[in-house]
């Protein structure tokens, strides 16, 4: 048995131990994999995947989430979450995810209790353990379990297992919520989230695959994968026109390209100033 | 970004000038730098498109002057192309 097989077996064991599960499901690589395996191990009657929908949840992600539950027979429920109504979240502090996840896990815990699911699960994996993840604190407080992390599965391993299981998410770029495009301290509003979503759609429509549009007030700063920087320059006029048409006054291209968690680079000096 | 980097107009201007001087010393002539964004943490560099790779080589040095991000001003590139 390979190490990866052993981890997969450990995951199956953890799921069996849970008995029945309610999964926080975004349709991303991790939660899609977890939901798929949970249905295989426990049967669909003991699994419920729940998606929290809000302005920060990208439409393109929802399409993938719905596709996976349809293709793999995963019982699914969508609930409206309202984290933007929480001033603690909207102010966009560095622990913003804590407030969002507290809302999400509280809702899921209530659903699980009402419908008789024994355990609430999230899709955190072994790589997340070393990162700055205030959302994981909320999970702990709500007694949410993280079976992928408990089994020691890394993101790369989850992608490989997803590929073997035929999941369309296996090579999907990471897709955190839209609020992650706003630097800490810049308040999260529906209008800003819509601007980011439309701007990213403009890049996606032009064939870019790994990128982020970072919102800096009236400025859009594009982070595109190193291999696509040249094409971004070739399309400078087109991208500038498209994004300025969405209300940005100026469009910038980050010289270092796309990197996951770039906004956390500012963390040691995030200042606790009122959001603007 | 250095947490001590100031937000007063004269401090912001000093950072911009320091970044321009650094780029000139590194052979990127005529580049202009504007501190932009809600907290003025982004160094928006007005330079020709073909300077991108060289800007990336010196991003760390520019950040050390008090910026969090270094970016080429794509709007300026587009405007220059439009004029060309």
Image (cartoon, rainbow, N blue to C red):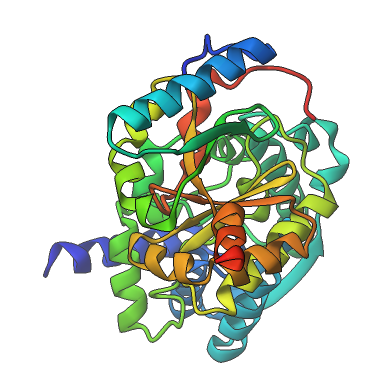
Quadrant of the image containing the N terminus of chain A: bottom left
Q: Which residue is drawn at 57% across and 74% down?
A: A204
Q: Which residue lies furthest to the left in this view?
A: A1
Residue A49 lies, with reference to residue B68, above or below; the image says: below
Q: Residue at x 43, y 54 (%)?
A: A258
- What x and y, as percent, mark residue A67? 60, 85
Q: Residue furthest right?
A: A85
- What x and y, as percent, mark residue A87? 84, 32
Quadrant of the image containing the C terminus of chain A: top right
Task: Choose top left, top right, bottom left or bottom right for residue A62.
Answer: bottom right
Residue A235 lies, with reference to residue B19, above or below; the image says: below
Q: Which residue is drawn at 73% across and 18% down?
A: A273
Count of numbered circles in the view: 0
- What x and y, as percent, mark residue B70? 46, 38
Q: Residue furthest front?
A: B84
Residue B71 in view here? yes
Residue A121 in view here? no
In the picture, measured across the screen, residue A76 lies left or right of residue A47, that is right
Residue A202 lies, with reference to residue B41, above or below; the image says: below
> Residue A81 versus residue A216: which sits nearer the camera?
A216
Q: Residue at x 84, y 53 (%)?
A: A191
- What x and y, as percent, mark residue A185? 69, 29
> Residue A184 versus residue B54: which sits nearer the camera?
B54
Residue A209 lies, with reference to residue B72, above or below; the image says: below
């Amino acid at each position: 048995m390979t190490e990866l097989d052993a981890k997969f077996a450990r995951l199956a064991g953890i799921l069996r131990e849970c008995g029945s599960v309610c999964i926080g499901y975004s349709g991303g690589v991790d939660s899609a994999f977890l939901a798929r395996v949970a249905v295989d191990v426990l049967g669909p009657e003991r699994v419920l995947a729940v998606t929290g929908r809000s302005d920060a949840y990208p439409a393109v992600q929802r399409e993938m989430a719905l596709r996976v539950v349809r293709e793999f027979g995963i019982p699914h429920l969508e609930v409206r979450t309202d984290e933007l109504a929480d001033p603690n979240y909207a102010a966009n502090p560095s622990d913003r995810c804590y407030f969002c996840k507290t809302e999400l896990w509280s809702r899921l815990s209530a659903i699980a209790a009402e419908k008789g699911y024994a355990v609430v699960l999230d899709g955190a994996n072994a790589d997340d353990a070393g990162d700055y993840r205030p959302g994981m604190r909320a999970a702990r407080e709500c007694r949410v379990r993280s079976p992928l992390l408990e089994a020691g599965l890394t993101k790369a391993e989850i992608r490989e297992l997803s590929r073997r299981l035929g999941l369309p998410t296996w090579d999907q770029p990471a897709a955190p919520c839209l609020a992650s495009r706003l630097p800490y301290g810049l308040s999260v509003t529906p209008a800003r989230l819509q601007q980011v979503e439309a701007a990213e759609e403009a890049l996606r429509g032009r064939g870019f695959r790994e990128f982020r549009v970072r919102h800096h007030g009236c400025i859009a700063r594009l982070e595109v994968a190193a291999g696509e920087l040249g094409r971004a320059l070739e399309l400078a006029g087109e991208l500038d026109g498209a994004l300025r048409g969405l209300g940005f006054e100026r469009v910038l291209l980050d010289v270092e390209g796309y990197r996951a968690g770039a906004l956390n680079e500012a963390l040691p000096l995030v200042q606790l100033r009122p959001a603007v | 970004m250095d947490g001590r980097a100031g937000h007063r107009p004269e401090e912001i201007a000093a950072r911009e000038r320091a970044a321009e001087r650094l780029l000139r010393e590194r052979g990127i002539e005529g580049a202009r730098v504007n501190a932009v964004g809600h907290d003025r943490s982004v160094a928006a560099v007005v330079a020709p498109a073909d300077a991108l790779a060289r800007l990336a080589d010196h991003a760390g040095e520019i950040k050390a002057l008090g910026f969090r991000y270094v970016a080429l001003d794509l709007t300026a590139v587009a405007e220059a192309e439009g004029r060309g």
